[in-house]
Amino acid sequence: MFRRAGQLQFASSLFRYPAAAPSRHYSFEVFRDVPPLRQLRRDLLLSKRTVGLVPTMGALHDGHLSLIRQAASENTDVFVSIFVNPTQFGVNEDLSSYPRTWDADIAKLEQLNDELKSGNSGSITAILAPTPKTMYPTLPPSSEINGDGSFVTITPLAKKLEGASRPVFFRGVATVCMKLFNIVGAERVYFGQKDVQQTVVIKRMVKDFHLDTEVKIGPTMREVDGLALSSRNVYLGARRRKVGLVLFSALKAAESAYQSGKLARSDILGPSNDITRDVLSQQQSLSPAERVTFEVDYISLADPDTLEEVETIDPAKGAILSGAIKMAPLEKTNAGEDCGLGDGKVAVRLIDNLILKPVSE
Ligand code: PAF
């Protein structure tokens, strides 16, 4: 490991992929390096096949699988990247504890490929699971906001909302996506609506850099009660899982206000804020072994293109309603309690959003 102040850990223990990718056992090829993948891409192009890229950081869940299904319905070949991208984690963030579930991911992709290959859609042809050195060939780039490295910055979008609490996050996302898009040369790239700001940043990057790819957005996948699927949900455990639904409930209340004809910010966000405040005060009245505490980072009502906060919604444009809450670690746990991965000690940031669609006359 080579860590100077602000530099990212590139310790191999953080990247538990098989040393050599034994791709012959899979129904897709696994690439750890760029040139062989480019060769395959060229062959596909010459055969007039189309590629849809689904970038992921692994820990695959049904949200990812649904994006892959969408990509397979619109392309002959799907490439999935699995890379826990160090540059989108700040110095104090959860890079080392981010779930890494290579075997389970590959098993899910194999099972999905059986399904895809038995239908008449495209299927998964390649997994790109590069090493950090492949993705960042020159330097271990800095995780400091003013640090060195070859970065793509998309401002002011990247500074808003999630970017306000995670200042290097979208620089890391834009940088790694630029690399992945350059490596794969996909006709289409697929992102989930769940990370709405990420979709806005990526669309802006594609537009501003004239990247020759189409950005496609798949719907947020939810549990039956509405909780948005996220790789980080495994840390919640039963108690925080239940209270974590507060974010979705708050956004739904704001959405109902819009659907009932309200356009002013206070009329829309008022009901959301009431819900978060009430749930928090209920929790605070409980004992440490029963309660869950959380902090609302933001509930935002923003313009769909610029992410500027809006005072009054323009019904011809609609708006993005989004929020983030930070679930604190459990103060006291009970014997036999399901506290999630990390035994309830890991703080969990939950984000979610709903699109307030334009209202046609
Ligand atoms: O959404 C994610 O999982 C990541 O931000 C992405 C797009 C794969 C970039 O690392």
Image (tube, grey):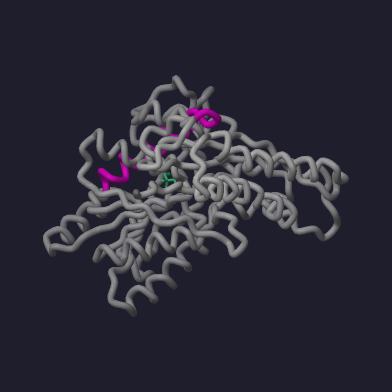
Specify whether residue 87 is in view: no
Place of residue 133 in the rendered image (x, y in percent of width and height, measured from the top left): 38, 40
Residue 206 coordinates in the image, percent (x, y): 27, 40
As drawn, which residue projects farthest toward the top?
Answer: 146
Q: Viewed as shown, does residue 174 lie left or right of 299?
A: left
Rendered residue at 42%/52% (across/down): 192
Position of 71 with respect to 56 (left or right) is left
Please name the residue shown 40% across and 46% down the image. Answer: 131
From the viewer's perspective, is residue 117 above or below residue 153? below
Q: Is residue 195 among what the camera can see?
A: yes
**Above or below 123: residue 286:** above
**The residue stretch that appears in magenta:** 163-183
Residue 305 image offset from top left, x and y in percent = 36, 37
Say if the magenta span includes residue 173: yes
The residue positioned farthest toward the bottom in the image shown: 118
Above or below, 119 against 87 in this view is below
Query: Please, what is the dominant secondary structure of the magenta stretch?
Result: helix
* Residue at the (65%, 52%) spot, across then down: 245
Horizontal side of 361 relative to 235 (left or right) equals left
Residue 324 image position (x, y, % from top left): 58, 40
Viewer-nearest residue: 76 or 201: 201
> How many numbered dots are placed on residues in this image?
0
Between 29 and 165, the residue placed more toward the observer is 165
| Foreground of the two, 65 or 86 | 65
Q: Is residue 171 magenta?
A: yes
Name the quadrant containing residue 142: top left
Q: Nearer the viewer, residue 131 or 183?
A: 183
Q: Residue furthest left?
A: 46
